[in-house]
Image (cartoon, rainbow, N blue to C red):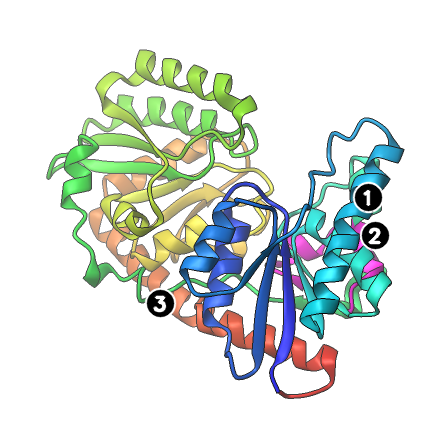
Amino acid sequence: MPWRVLYVDHADLMGGAEQSLLLLLRHLDRARVEPLLACRPGTPLAQAAREAGRPVVEVPLGQLRGRRTPWALAAGLARGASALARVARSFGADLLHANVARASAYAACASLATGIPLAWHVRDVYQMRRPDEWLLVHFASRVARAILCISLATARPLPSAAAPKVHLVPNGLDLTRFDPARVQPQALRARWGAGAGDVLVGTVGWLSPWKQTEHFLEMAAQVARRCAEARFVVVGEAANPRYAAYVEDLQARAQERLGERIRFVGALPAEEMPAAMAALDLLVHTARAEPLGLVLVEAMAMERPVVAYGDGGVPEVVVDGETGLLVPPGDVAALAQAVVRLARDRPQREALGRAGRERVLARFTAEAMARRVEGIYAEVLGSNG
């Protein structure tokens, strides 16, 4: 009999954590795992999972951050955890699998209420600066039977007592989709203002202060003065409505400093992402404390070199001098110098790109991720399925 696993996700947006969970659901061996996804009503993840033929149940998992009082926080947590416990019992779950921290708060409470073991998927680098984050991480670490970390960078901040439970499970990628031989990026390049002789430099992802998109703009301004063939594109949208003013300011500054040499193209449908990565000549990533960086894996899979800050989990993906170039975190001048170096050296860009895809094939496939997760389930549940 397959293990019945209840997957729990709280997010309203389809971020990297949700994309990776969806990919896991698609690649699990259904002879070993019978999945059910529990998430908030009407989320993009719920819709995508249903379209992929995976069962979904909607549960009122309210946002925990921003609750005005401890009593309001406790009441909201109790409501969501009780609903989750009912779903787990009805489903006959053998295991709860929580996707990131806030989902783990609900799942840990449901685990304690039902006796069903918990696996917690850690996809963030916790700073432990807020009391609520410290409490949540320590609570989930204590309750979880297994802790799945997408990188060493996400594992390091966890309590030392959690170390025996930690398993390293890097995010995987569907390489049947991310295959350079299967895309035609020329139309996107033309739409983004890049001609045949231009070098298109892009950044991809949510636009937010954490992603430090302003560093990309400063880098672009420096590169533009030294490299006439450079063109720039920003792919993504505000991570949250409260960042709308931040994005408007970015666009105004970009227009003032770079004019027609930069385009803000918004978020793209998932099916366009392989072609979008292939349309670039190189990807620049400026996030701080990046847990892993799925966009880095995507770019490398499409044989595109990466220039990034050597921070968080990024060095676990990008090998400096082999699949891309890493510079000290926050050093925009070094970032610009690395981009200029690659913009002027097409053979090196191509060599780094080829090595990047080889690294993805060796370390970041969806199949390897799914088999690793199934092995952890076997350890927790005491059976090979």
The CA span between labels 2 and 1 is 6 Å
Q: Which residue is mark 1?
A: 134
Is 347 situated left or right of 205 in this image? left
The CA span between labels 2 and 3 is 37 Å
What amino acid type should be assigned to the residue bearing mark 1? Trp
Q: Position of residue 12 (x, y in %)?
A: 56, 41
Q: Which residue is mark 2?
A: 138
Q: Secondary structure at mark 2?
A: helix
Determine crowd level at label 2: few under 14, some 14-19, many 20+ residues with C-alpha closer than 10 A: some
What amino acid type should be assigned to the residue bearing mark 2? His
Q: Secondary structure at mark 3?
A: helix
Determine crowd level at label 1: few under 14, some 14-19, many 20+ residues with C-alpha closer than 10 A: some
Residue at the farthest left position: 196
Q: What residue range appears in magenta?
A: 137-160
Instruction: Tell me if residue 329 is in the magenta stretch.
Output: no
Q: Nearer the viewer, residue 288 or 377?
A: 377
Q: Position of residue 376 (x, y in %)?
A: 66, 76
Q: Which residue is mark 3?
A: 358
